[in-house]
Amino acid sequence: MKYLKSVLIVFFAFLFTNVNAQQTVDVTFRYYTNDNAIRAFVPGSFNNWGNNTSGRINTDDGSLMMEDTVNGFWYKTVTLNVGGGTFSYNGTDGYAYKFHEQYNEDGSDWDWFTDPLNPIAIGENSDSFLEVTHPLIFQLQPSENDITDESSEIWATVAAMDSDSIDLAASVFYLNGDSAGSFEGLYDIERQLFSITEIDSLDLLVGENLLRIEAVTQSGASKSDSVSFVYLPDIDPVQEVRPQGLRDGITYMDFGIGEVALSLFAPGKDYVFVIGDFNDWQPSEEYLMKKDSLNADSAWHWIEFNVPTGQEYTFQYLVDGELRIADPYSELVLDPNNDQYISNETFPNLKAYPNGKTTGYVSLIQPGKEAFPWEEFAFTRPAQEELMIYELLIRDFLHIKNYQTLT
């Protein structure tokens, strides 16, 4: 009996080990290189980080990706264990990885990059992190808050174990809460890639859209993921001459009702949206600036709108759906990298940067703010040749580095 028990224990241990050994998913990694790259790699904790030497990977290393010249990306399929990996994020185990580009034949000119299609990065080197599940939805594109147009595409790795593959009829995708179709005809079975390469064939809204993918396997196991993105097809702004007297930058039209006018000189640009706190940083037709064109290479973009008085708002210009800039004439901007070093003594009650909403400098508007009470109206500026100008670097001149101390 003792011998039989030992045999059973060994048998079940063997069976359990073999079942676990089969819990793998073939994960296809995709990467869009910079224009000057001639090859790409996907080094990670699953392949000894490309066996690199001081950051350099051999040109024939096993982490080398293949180029998909039709779809414009590099890819590699890697077999990974479900729930495997020696790294962790929020209590889950997974794999760390990055992408590696090379710019010459011998690979001596190279660089490493965090995955732009994966929002999860860990550690001091910002390594991308992947938790392998069954089924798996990975590298959903567009990414969160991406701005797309009619030339954009939808892609995602949607993978499962070989023993329980994706059910194409049961797997579906939704747009703005409505069912938009199944995976049938949209799924590359070999690479386990879901794609819609003609995004303008979908019933998208101009502005914010919500895409949700629901992957279902043959056994009924399911996984879903979603992303919000902005769709801006060919935009045609209203052509209208700026009101007389409207100057570039920020103009408060009436301190009582909170009316604000913005004007941006942007030659060669097709359209500009105003995005900010007042529209949750999402472009919409209401905040599409009008266009006053002098000629083909010279144009102002301008808008008038109302916001409640008594509070501050941050905003940016979104130019041609790509470039986010602060107003060039702003008296005050927020800086996501350096505002942390400004003390409350130097600038009391500085408004918080809208993290997660945008990137880069943002401008501040204060509708309803009273004009500065000038006390001297008879001041006469000295002749230019009689002026004496001093340059002072506050950082080096003062121990407490602010204008209050200097004054």
Image: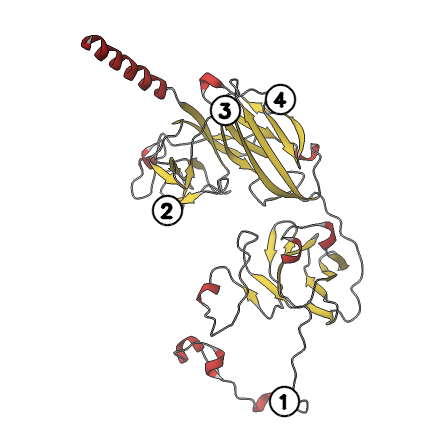
Nearest to N terminus: mark 1 or mark 2: 2
Query: Dot 2, how many residues are within 10 Å of its Cα: few (below 14), some (14-19), or many (20+)?
Result: few
Relative side of 169 to 203, left or right: left
Query: Considering depth in this image, is 248 or 65 the residue closer to the camera?
Result: 248
N-terminal-most mark, 1 or 3: 3
Position of residue 40 relative to residue 327, above or below, is above
Residue to which mark 3 is pinned: 191
Q: Which residue is mark 2?
A: 123
The kind of residue tagged 4 is: Gly
Find the residue positioned furthest to the front: 1
Q: Which residue is mark 4?
A: 185
Label 3 environment density (alpha carbons within 10 Å; few <14, some 14–19, many ≥20): some
Nearest the eye: 340 or 242: 340
Q: Earlier in the sequence, mark 2 or mark 3?
A: 2
Tell me which numbered mark, 1 or 4, is placed earlier along the sequence: 4
Looking at the image, residue 36 lies above or below residue 59: below
Q: CA distance from mark 3 to mark 4?
A: 14 Å
Q: Which residue is mark 1?
A: 381
Dot 3 falls on a residue whose secondary structure is loop
Q: Amino acid at mark 3?
A: Arg
In the foreground, 146 or 41: 146
Instruction: State the separation of the CA atoms marked 1 and 3.
Output: 73 Å
Q: Position of residue 12 (x, y in %)?
A: 30, 15
Mark closest to the chain's N terminus, 4 or 2: 2
The 10 Å Cα crowd at callout 1, few under 14, some 14 to 19, many 20 or more, is few
Q: Is residue 174 left or right of residue 76?
A: right
Label pair 4/2, CB-CB below 8 angstroms:
no
Q: Amino acid at mark 1?
A: Arg
Quarter of the picture holding the N terminus: top left
